[in-house]
Image: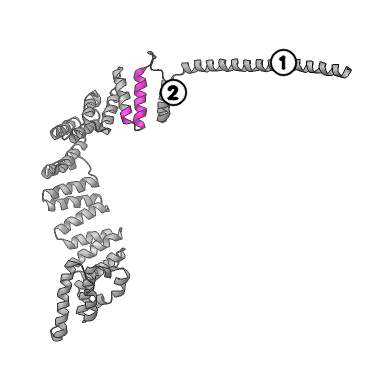
Amino acid sequence: MGKTEDILQAEVIMSKYSVLRDTALVFIILCMFAAALAYAAEKKEDESKLDYIAVAVRLCSDGHYDRAVKVLDNVDLSNEDIDFITYYTIRGMAEARLGHYQAAVDSFRKSVNHGQTDSSVYVYLSNLYFKLNQYENAIEFINHSGSTLLSDPKLLLLKAECFWRLKRYPETFNTLEAASEIFPDEPVFVRQRFYYFLQLQLYRRAAEAAEHYLAKGTPSVDDYIAVANALMGTKQVDKAIIFLERARLVYPYNKRVIVALANLYVKKRHFITAAGLFERLSFMNPGYARDAAELYRRNRRYFHALYLNSRVPDQKAKIKQKLAILLDMKAFEMVANMRLVLSRTGLLDDDNIRYAYAYALFFTGNYDQAEKYLKQISQREVFQKATGLREMIEKCRREPDQC
């Protein structure tokens, strides 16, 4: 019995201890919950005091535009004490930097509606509308930019470009004329007039504008070539050549200037002069050796043409040109010896090359081989020539003394 009483007493003690333990645990949990509520309330109070707009300004200044937009999303717009001008201006700047042009326009417009008067916002809006291809709106805000319009040449150029894209050409040129009066030392407006005249194919007006521009500014390579094209449009080839010779003095090693000038000399049939330009260019770019060789070939300077041909990097083009030069030289034996190289490069698969090779074989008296290649020709234009050559072969077989 003694043991039984002891056991019962122990169970009662353990039961009491368990109740005390559970009570303590609940108390601890309640204390932790109360602390959490207090922390949350304190945090909420701190967040309500946080100036999201100031944080967004700082983020924008550091280039974190996406984070700035997310911070601004936390602003309570129902609060009438919010600085809406700054809020929408900063949001517009961040959206613009992120490439969200329509969202940026909406924000800037709201800043204007809330009383924004800073002219830079109008400049932002005009640029954004231009990027959105809304040129009428862009012009409207350029006109509202006030003194900025009269102090920023780029804004006037933008206005002219808006008129141009709307195909309102008189207003385009009027804007550029007015801009030239405001900025008399700025050549960019005359330059733009030149390019607009060129696009309208008013070559004479373009050439006049070009001369005016050259007197005021330092032309780029693009400008020199564009002016030469304008002069070509007015059939003033000689004047275009003189102009590009001037360009070559300024840019003596510029490939585009040299090529444009060489092509003009070709147009005037001054092949040797053009060949010299291409040859000089080939020392920097071997690809132009082929052009130089071709021009020397046209002028019957065959040995110099062969020398330049040896420097052509493109093997197919090189062999094909060499074949043409040797045929011009009537060096038929040398052409006949080119069978392996013509076959290896795949050129004998070309009907024109087959005919040229057969032509050389004919003049070396190798009629059977010539006919072999002529029979492989199927292209209509070449086939007609091949038929004529086969008739000549038959005639030479019948009357060898006549060949």
Q: Few, some or many C-alpha atoms within 10 Å of disc 1 (few <14, some 14-19, many ≥20)? A: few
Q: Which residue is mark 1?
A: 19
Dominant secondary structure of the residues highlighted in magenta in the image: helix
Residue 165, placed above or below residue 276: above
Label 2: element kind: helix
Rendering coords of residue 266 (x, y %): 17, 59
Label 1: element kind: helix
User: What residue do we see at 60% from left, 17% from top?
Assistant: 33
Magenta region: 82-103
Outermost right residue:
2
Badge 2 or badge 1: first in the primary sequence: 1
Residue 349, placed above or below residue 179: below
Q: Quadrant of residue 370?
A: bottom left
Q: Quadrant of residue 403?
A: bottom left
Distance from the alpha carbon under mark 2 to that under mark 1: 53 Å
Three-letter amino acid code at the position of disc 2: Val
Q: Few, some or many C-alpha atoms within 10 Å of disc 2 (few <14, some 14-19, many ≥20)? A: some
Q: Which disc is residue 55 wearing?
A: 2
Three-letter amino acid code at the position of disc 1: Val
Determine if residue 74 is in view. yes
Tell whether position 219 is magenta: no
Left or right relative to 206: residue 122: right
Q: Quadrant of residue 167?
A: top left
